[in-house]
Amino acid sequence: MRIFSGIKPSGDPTLGNYSGGFRQYAATQEMGDAYFCIVDLHAITVEYDPADLHERTLDLFAMLVATGLDPDRSTVFAQSHVTAHAEASWLLSAVTSYGQLGRMTQFKEKGSRQDFVSAALFNYPILMSGDILLYQADIVPIGDDQRQHLELARDVAERFNTRFGEVFTVPEGVYPEVGARIMDLQDPLGKMGKTGSSEQGTVRLLDAPDAIRRKFRTAVTDSGREVRRGPDKPGISNLIDIMSVATGTTPDAVEAEYGDAGYGAFKQAVGEAVVALLEPVQQRYAELRGDDGELLRLLGQGAEKARAASAPTLERMYEAMGFARLR
Ligand code: ATP
Ligand code: MG
C-alpha cells in the first residue's frame, strides 16, 4: 500500500490540520510505504513573504515529526527538493480540464481574498495531482476541504491512463470519521485554516495553554443549552467534534457526558482537553526545533528517497506521452 499526503508551509499549523492532517499521517504511516510532503511550491500560490518560507519549512518538518511521523520509516520531504513535481505538473496540465479547474471552490474562495490572483492559484490542483500520482499512491489522507481536489486528481489520472496508457494508480481519499472539517471557533460556518480564518477562532498547535483556553472560552455557541450535535447547532457540533478528536472518544460519548453540563462548563472542558492533547506535541517540537542541522539532514534523506520513488513514474509519463528520451 502506497500512502501520500501533503501540507503547505503557509502559516502556523492549526487544530484543523491536526485533525485532517497530522493525526491521519501518523496513523496511516503504519499501513505501508508512506510519503509525506511539505508542499512548499503550493505555498507561493497566494501572497507570501519569501523571508519566512525557509523557516516555515523547517517548522513544519519538526511538527510532522512531533506529531508522530518517523522520518526513517516514512519518506518526509520538501516538494521543491524533488523537481519531478514541477515537471509532472506541466505534463499533467495537458490532461486537466480548464473548466473543471475554474469550478474549484478553493480557487474561488482564496482568489476572492487576493488583490492579485495568480495563475499558480488556478493551476494548484494540477500540481497537487502530480504530487499524488508520482508516488502511485493508493490512499491520500486529507481533510474534507480537499475532497474536490482529490476528485480532480482522480479524473486527471483516468484521463491520462485512457489517452496515453496505464501509468497511474487512481488514488482514494481517506477522511477522518470525525473532525474531517474543523470550523473557526468564532465562525462555525467557516473552516479553520492556517490562513483565512479569524485569529481568535483559530487554535494553533503551538499556542500557549492560556491562549488555547481563552479561545475556547470565547468560542461562539448556539441558541438552546443542550450539548448535542445538529444542523441548528454548528458551534456546539464543532466543539463536540473537537472534544472527540482531542480525547479519542466518540461524539455520542461526549454528548452523553456533557449533554446537561451547560455551554460554559463544556467549553472549558474542551479547552482543557486540547491543552492536554497539545502539551506533549509542543514539548517534542521544542526539542526538535532546536537542531537545524539535524532537520536539514533529515530533509536531505527524505529528498533522496522521494527522488528515487518518483523518478520511474516521471520517466513512464514522458515515454507514454511520446517524448524522445536520451538514454
Ligand atoms: P491554508 O489556509 O494555507 O490553505 P490549511 O490550514 O487549509 O492552510 P493545508 O496545508 O491547505 O492547510 O492542508 C493541509 C491538510 O490539512 C489537508 O489535508 C487539509 O484537508 C487539512 N485541513 C486543513 N484545514 C482543516 C480543517 N479545518 N479540518 C480538517 N482538516 C483540515
Ligand atoms: Mg488549505
Image (tube, grey):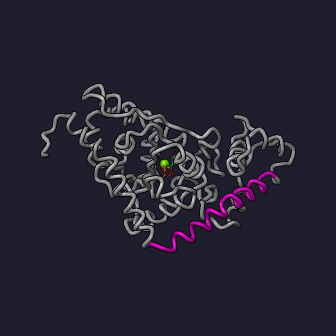
Query: Is 278 displayed left or right of 109 in the figure?
Result: right
Q: Residue at x 74, y 45 (%)?
A: 249
Q: Nearer the viewer, residue 137 or 259?
A: 137
Horizontal side of residue 206 vs 152, given as left or right = right
Q: Nearer the viewer, residue 235 or 129?
A: 129
Q: From what the image shows, is residue 150 above or below residue 262?
A: above
- Magenta region, main secondary structure: helix
From which residue to which does the magenta span run?
Answer: 266-292
User: Which quadrant would residue 227 be assigned to in this image?
Assistant: top right
Q: Residue at x 45, y 64 (%)?
A: 56
Position of residue 239 relative to residue 44, above or below, is above
- Look at the image and tell me whether residue 280 can be seen: yes
Q: Position of residue 273 (x, y in %)?
A: 73, 56
Q: Nearer the viewer, residue 130 or 227?
A: 130
* Left or right: residue 96 compared with residue 20: left
The reply to whether the magenta stretch includes residue 65 is no
Residue sitting at x 62%, y 50%: 184
The image quadrant that residue 305 belongs to is bottom left
Answer whether residue 217 is visible to the viewer in this image: no
Q: Position of residue 26 (x, y in %)?
A: 56, 51
x then y, percent, for residue 116:
36, 53
